Image (spheres, rainbow, N blue to C red):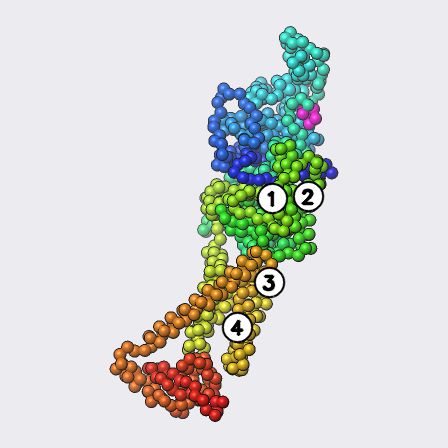
Amino acid sequence: MRISIILLIILFPVLTVCTFAECFLLDIPLPITGQASHAIAQSLERTISEIQKTHRTKIDPADENSEPKTPEPETTPTIILRFRVDADQEEFGRGSSFGACYELADLLVSEKFHGIRTVAYFPQSVQGHVLLVALACNERIAAESAEIGEAGIDETNISDTQRQAYHEISKRRHVFPPAVIDKLLDKQTELLQVETEKGIRLVSPQETEELRRTETFVAEPVTLIASGAPGLFTADAARKFGLINLIANDRVILARGLGFRPDDIKNAPVSSEQGHAVRIDLAGLMNNDRVGSAIRSIQKALEPNPVTINQRNMGTVKVDFLCIYIDSPGGNIEASLNMASYLARNIDSTKVRTVAYIPYQARSDAAIIALACDEIVLGTNAILGGDGAVVFSESQIADARQTIRDFLSHETIRSWSLPAGFIDSEIEVFKVTRSGRLTDYLCDEELKQLPDAELWKKGEIVKEKGKLLRIVGGKGEQYFVDRTAEDFTEFKFLYGLENDILLVEPTWADQLVQSLSSPGMSMIILMIVFLAVSIEAQTPGVGIGAFIAAVGIVLFFWLHFLGGTAGWLEVCLFLAGVVCVLLEIFVLPGVGIFGIGGAITIIISLVLASQTFIIPQNSYQFLQLRNSLLILAVSGTGILILSNILIRTVHNANKPKDTALIRETEKLAHYEPLLGQTGVTITPLVPAGKAMIGGEPINIVSDGELIEKGQTVKVVEVIGYKVVVRKIETADNV
């Protein structure tokens, strides 16, 4: 219950330009052996490198003669070493190698860590030489139920070298008294507590006699741990005597005790010689199929399977970095929550680092997926949250809000007010402060749930009621954003992944599909379709124009099917519109209703195929509707211009420039005698077709108007092979 209450007071970070220092957490499974020590040292080196890249203050080498000091949390980057004992291990992490632990301790007190705050955290009881690594840290923290001690439990005899190493490391940090070090190593020693006019001290019997000669005792010495008893300290005792700095049962209390918000603590870079990074794409509208495919891709990527690249066997590789590439306007809120839940629950952040990269947009529910990752990187103008492609019902919002509050906030060590603001416009979030230093962003409901709610002072509104939370990359307060990257190349550079053979961008086929589905390409496809229809109308029969138009329409709807905006409704509307137009031309000419209705239906189907809604309800949907209409308008205008140019070009190309050549062409064609003759159309002229003139079927072209089948026409012009006719009014035509 206590942990549950504390989890409700999780704080969210405001990651502005280095207002707070970076804080990294490195999980260290026990025991520490030589091989494990090497991997831990690599992770520490990579963490230092990452800190040096991003921290605003240059970390200078330490002066060997200077006295080590505990850095201030608000100005100094921090590395937390969390020593973890596996659940199936009953020996409290025993078995750690002295040599391996000393190498790590020596690294932690070296010049490389000058200006970096190091913290040893014991969530469980720990024994063995791992305590030597803890001595090398600036601070030590333990859980309430943890006991720490018996550093020499794995040794039959403590050598002088080992004893000297412990005293040397302890002296560098000025933390543990020599008598405590001796008791931790050797249970045969005795640890006393004495109180003089200068305070309480922990000393050995020999040191007690020396103090009697120099200081006045307030009371007689008390045996704290007798000879033969193990040198173990409970968390309360260790805190009382200054051996640890804080008692923390979970990550939330740990963060607050160190002066950070819980979400400020990031997982340190995982070091592995065989580790690689992979990219999983979530582009387009969120739906169950897309999320299911992404989850399967992640599961496959995390399996240590043999990998072959460019016909080279790369062996069995392990993935320790997942880039979740999100470019989505949102969509299905249930699918997005499923994806977020999978990332939060099924990915061990101590082994695999997950980073959401958003180059353009992760709107509405898609933003929840990003929050389930360890870190978020935004493009310089990318949008996180805000209005999305779908407006959710009240029941959907209520269910999503409950999931965020009761599950995701606990799994990701985050509060729920601001995340819920991505999908619930009715939440009003305030900036609240406590003691003038701690800051959080909470709604009234979450604020009232805090056990110390009366100590928090409500400030300005950071998320207004009636609007969804919206963050733009590189601008304003960045509530969740860790970094910004102009492109994917810069993203890889930020994480040192430039040469990773598995972190590849989409294939040329994926890029082609993405390019074809863009609004600009949709406009070009429609222009080609309209132009092909215009060409087909100028020529008799069914030819290349009809074929190109059919292919273009199929491509248009297929791309929007892939994007999730088109469905069978739009296809049926388009086919119905085409049928109505054909009825107007070939079956019921002159009625008008079928032609006009069919054209409107076709336009509606093309607009709906470019969006996920029928009636716009938010700013994003109005923008999409405007873009859809703009595509049609530009396409229509473009086709009118191109058609006019094409008709003029074809007409001039078919018309010989030389009069003598014209006469010769007409002579060869034998069409000149047709001038002035009349005939009857045997096909509709739209505007090209055929008519029976002089007892022979002749390919003809109307002089402008559409002429139905069976109408009397007169040849008014002959240009080479082109026979132009005009409808004449007769009793049969009326």
Residue that label 1 marks = 462
Query: In the rendered image, is residue 316 in sight?
Result: no
Marks 1,3: beta carbons within 8 A: no
Q: Position of residue 553 (x, y in %)?
A: 50, 68
Categorize mark 1 by other alpha carbons within 10 Å: few (<14), some (14-19), many (20+). Answer: some
Query: In the rendered image, is residue 111 in sight?
Result: yes
Marks 1,2: beta carbons within 8 A: no
Q: Quadrant of residue 411?
A: top right
Q: CA distance from mark 1 to mark 4?
A: 48 Å
Residue range corresponding to the magenta coloring: 232-239
Q: Secondary structure at mark 3?
A: loop
Q: Secondary structure at mark 2?
A: helix
Amino acid under disc 1: Val
Q: CA distance from mark 2 to mark 3?
A: 33 Å
First along the sequence among labels 1 and 2: 2
Residue at 54% over, 58% down:
623
Amino acid under disc 3: Ile
Marks 3,4: beta carbons within 8 A: no
Residue at 43% over, 84% down:
690
Residue that label 3 marks = 615
Q: Position of residue 320 (x, y in %)?
A: 55, 43
Q: CA distance from mark 1 to mark 3?
A: 30 Å
Closer to viewer: mark 4 or mark 2: 2
Q: CA distance from mark 1 to mark 2?
A: 13 Å
Predominant SS along the magenta part: helix
